Image (cartoon, rainbow, N blue to C red):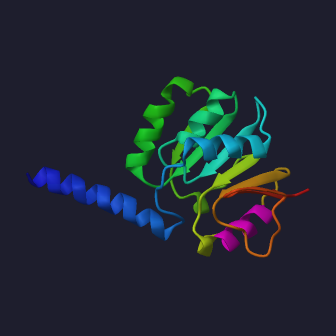
Amino acid sequence: MYLVYLLLGLAFISFSLVILRGAPFLPTLGPQIKKSMELSELKPGQTLIELGSGDGRVLLEAAKRGIYAIGYELNPVLVLISVCRTWRYRKYVKVIWGDFWLKDWPPADVIFVFLLTKYMKKLDTKCMQYTHKPVKLVSFVFEVPHKKPAKVDGSVRVYNYGR
């Protein structure tokens, strides 16, 4: 019985601590993912990074389209779910357990995020310093303060950096 309580406690801590670094886990719905893929104009062979990749839904959709996907996730439970969910497409998907704020991001064509408002300014600064090449930032729900999106469709916004 103590093992059950221990596991529940660890799961609670894993899901709660992530909020302190960016956003809670809320699964992205299929229609939002498809809309985001269309707005980002990603093509097979291109690369996307998802900051806070959760259970791997966006990574999986990208891989199905022949897009290379790198997901950063802080919650170890969600990392395991992502790896299992995307296993069939492991040629296209890499899931990294860690804090994306502390990592160097590899070259990518698009960065996907669902971050709370209070982190969007910090993200904007990091994207402006992203030196690999021009990149699009696709944000679910939350806006980058004082920056006009290149495209908006409902709750999905696309911002251009380095162009």
Tell which of 146 and 38 is nearer to you: 38
Tell which of 9 and 96 is nearer to you: 9
Q: Is residue 115 left or right of residue 41?
A: left
Q: Is residue 4 left or right of residue 103?
A: left
At 41% from the left and 65% from the top, the residue drawn is 17
- Place of residue 115 in the rendered image (x, y in percent of width and height, measured from the top left): 59, 63
- Place of residue 60 in the rendered image (x, y in percent of width and height, measured from the top left): 57, 34
For the magenta stretch, what is the residue range? 120-129
At 59% from the left and 58% from the top, the residue drawn is 114
At 53% from the left and 45% from the top, the residue drawn is 96
Residue 121 sits inside the magenta stretch = yes
In the depicted structure, whether residue 125 falls above or below residue 91: below
Q: Main secondary structure of the magenta part?
A: helix
At 71% from the left and 47% from the top, the residue drawn is 106
| Residue furthest left as drawn | 1
- Place of residue 162 in the rendered image (x, y in percent of width and height, measured from the top left): 87, 58
Residue 97 sits inside the magenta stretch = no
Q: Is residue 105 left or right of residue 116?
A: right
